[in-house]
Image (cartoon, grey):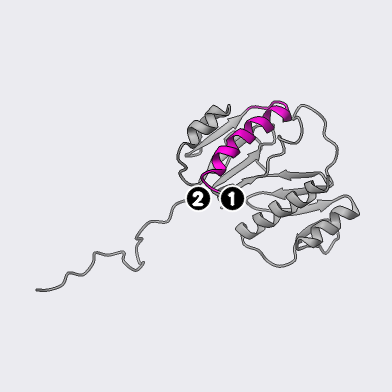
Amino acid sequence: MSFVNVPDVFIGSTDDGHTFVVLNRPIRGANRMLTGAGFTARRINDRTVYLLPPTTAEEVNERAGIAMYGLLAHTPDVVDLSWTTQGNPQDAQPEPSISFTLTSTSFSVTATTEVARLLLEHHGFARSADDTSYQPAMPLGMPHLLGAVVRTQAHARSYGITVHVELGIPTPDAIPAPSPRPSAAGPGRPGAGPAPRRSR
């Protein structure tokens, strides 16, 4: 399972500077809200993905903000880990104080300042054995780990600490497929067979 598939709405960035939105449950009017904000709907890996091409951070921020405002009226479960709203993809970016690597197969976080390191420790991250990165101090499931990243990012930005989240998605075509939906009654599960009939 990918982190992209955890919340109702996930907003992220690909390595080549696209901003994307995926919906993990049906939301009434979402297509109208997103396309109205300038996103283009594309079918990628068996899911509808809403895309903004690489452009200025100001434009992405405005368009994503319009979309988020509408979506938040239907669900509070919206996660935004995009970096394209913070800096222009075409410009060289300064090294962030906190860098998350958050992919389907790996997780790590690094800090370049003492304040950033203290903030990570405040949110439950501990230094690795080789002292080069941080990991959760306690094992966390994917939803709780994603929540820790979101809280850390929000806290850091409130203090002006720069944060970058690397999702390991090089282009829109690599955006993960949706998680398979559990079947209502699979083989070997209670209720899988026909209900017994009562004799008269």
Residue indicated by mark 1: 2
**Residue 154: within the magenta?**
no
Is 48 left, or right, of 89 in this rendering?
left
Report helix, strand or loop for mark 2. Answer: loop
Which residue does the image show at 52% across and 33% down from the upper left?
Answer: 33
Q: Is residue 42 above or below residue 165?
A: above
Q: Is residue 187 above or below residue 106?
A: below
Looking at the image, which residue sits at the far bottom? 199
Question: Could you classify mark 1 by the number of other residues whose Cα lies within 10 Å: few (under 14), some (14-19), or many (20 or more)?
Answer: some
For badge 1, the amino acid type reads Ser
Position of residue 153 measured from the top left corner of the image (x, y, whole percent): 74, 49
Q: Which residues are magenta?
A: 53-75
Which residue does the image show at 38% across and 56% down from the upper left?
Answer: 183
Position of residue 109 measured from the top left corner of the image (x, y, whole percent): 77, 53
Out of 146 and 135, give the one closest to the viewer.
Answer: 146
Circle number at residue 10: none
Looking at the image, which residue sits at the far right? 114
In the rendered image, which quarter contains the C terminus? bottom left
Is 101 left, or right, of 190 in this rendering?
right
Q: Are marks 2 and 1 in contact (CB under 8 Å)?
A: yes
Report helix, strand or loop for mark 1. Answer: loop
Residue indicated by mark 2: 179
Which residue does the image show at 62% across and 41% down from the upper left?
Answer: 11
Question: Could you classify mark 2 by the number of other residues whose Cα lies within 10 Å: few (under 14), some (14-19), or many (20 or more)?
Answer: few
Residue 115, by quadrant, is bottom right
For badge 2, the amino acid type reads Ser
**Residue 68: within the magenta?**
yes
Which residue does the image show at 69% across and 33% down from the upper left?
Answer: 61
Residue 132, by quadrant, is bottom right
Residue 174: tell me if it is visible: no
